[in-house]
Amino acid sequence: MLTRLSITNYALIDRLDFQPGEGLSIITGETGAGKSIMLGALGLLMGDRADMKVIADKDKKAVVEASFTALDSRQSDILEKIDSEWDGTELIIRREIYPSGKSRAFVNDSPATLGQLQELSRGLLDIHSQNSNSILGEQKMQLELVDSFSDTASLLAEYEKEFSDYASLRQKIRKLKEDAQTVREHREIIAFRLEQLNRLKPKGGELKKVESRYEAMSKSEEIKSALTAALRSLSDDQATGAIERIENAAEHLSGIDFSLWEEEDPQIVSRLNQTLVELKDILDTVEGAMETTEYSAEAHESLSRRMKDYYTALKAFKVESDAELEEMHKELQRQFNALEKGDDDTAALEVQAKKKAASLKRIAAEITERRRKGAEILQGEIERQATKLGLPNLKFEISVSDTKLTRTGGDRVEFLATFNKSGDLRAVAQIASGGEMARLMLAIKNIMATSVKLPTIVFDEIDTGVSGSIANAMGEMMREMGRKMQILTITHLPQVAVKGERHFKVYKEDRDDKTISDVKLLTEAEREEEIGRMLSGEQLDKAAMENARSLLKK
């Protein structure tokens, strides 16, 4: 609901503050007083392009700002993308137009694009005149209206869940097929590379071990000579080895009490024995190395080939280590396996998708049947409402035709109409606007106000070209709509003007050296006078005032 419209430095408006309130608000005023300026300002908030010509004082910016409350989930979803801190209460949209020609838009002080304003405003404002068929030309809105008469809510919820599951299955199938196609396109390359790695069978850490063993075997003679010398030093047959000499020293020292020279026992023998343990362990290690340090031309060549195979693979596959080669080997094997089993997975999902599609068609068929019954009921209701507005020759039809399954079912709904007995039915969205079309739209919107959540509707002289009882019927219909939603009606007809819960007048006046437009909420006395002028023109007489009071009283 629009709670406030503020306009500053825009066309003939110096500063305007408009608060329409709930229900039906009437806006009247002489031609050229500024009603169209207010509509233009609202258009800016709906994402229309800005023109710097509308700036009154070229030294200042023009600002149009509006506040809205009681938003539905559609606006909430859009707002969360624009303003992450929106608290779910009041929405403020602002447009600023600068003398330079630059224009900026804000939603709750967060910068917004014109596209975002257009998307957001579709659920906030619907400005309707004889020159626009507005939201009723949208297939989505027509479908919602038919559904509101068709008892399809529970079926649609079931259908939408099934459709989401089906869409998910189809997405998985597409992905599997795309992956399989990619693998097929590279099958020869994958097979060739896999064969290379199958022969190599790379293992992380193996190359370092092979290099070490190759290095050891390449220097086996030098290593063996060094190991022999070390063994001789540690243990020698002539009792000159380090181990035997330390054992002799420990035996000679075992009977000596070193406390004669030291305050604390230095434990010489114990320390020598510990050293012997370490030396014997070293001896075992050296002897083990000695036993394995044997040169084999065949083994040496085998290690050399293994290293070269690794080096070739590292270069060919452009990796740094044998661990990366191992991972690549696993990945190539996975891709190759996927190629072999991919068709099986796809086939299984295709079976599931086929069952889901059958379920969707079954539910969609039931929805279609209900929609066609609901469309017949709605057709009759629209013709009944339109008759009240002086359209006795209206032929109205709601076409429910088959289409491919979408998230809303398998139907295409289209409103068709003609205002002549012999006329051909045409799509409502294609019918040239006019007085008859405006009345039909009013009848449809009256029905929608009860069954479909509509935004605030602004009727811009939708009653042009009618009078008398038809004008009264149109006013009464708008008043009924105002009991369910917010309606703003710009009118020149007193029969319509008296139906509003509040009455605003747009007027022009001269101030200093300029003419400005403004709007004010009329008191009861001012409203009687305004209705009287609408009845009699400029010459306000007693009869016109009495007639105005009578209309307002009724």
Image (cartoon, rainbow, N blue to C red):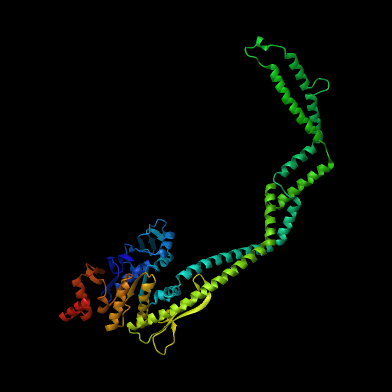
Can you say which quadrant of the picture contains the C terminus? bottom left
Can you say which quadrant of the picture contains the N terminus? bottom left
Question: 258 above or below 70?
Answer: above
Camera-nearest residue between 336 and 65: 336
Total marks placed: 0
Picture quadrant where residue 236 is located: top right
Question: 293 above or below 273?
Answer: below
Residue 147 x/y as whole percent = 44, 74
Picture quadrant where residue 216 is located: top right
Picture quadrant where residue 511 is located: bottom left
Q: Residue at x 72, y 61 (%)?
A: 188
Camera-nearest residue between 51 and 403: 403
Camera-nearest residue between 73 and 136: 73
Residue 19 x/y as whole percent = 28, 66
* 429 sits left or right of 349 in the view: left
Residue 436 appears anywhere in the view: yes
Residue 320 appears anywhere in the view: no
Q: Residue at x 42, y 56 (%)?
A: 84
Q: Residue at x 70, y 47 (%)?
A: 322
**Please, which residue is most extreme toward the top here?**
260
Residue 72 x/y as whole percent = 39, 64
Residue 485 x/y as whole percent = 33, 70
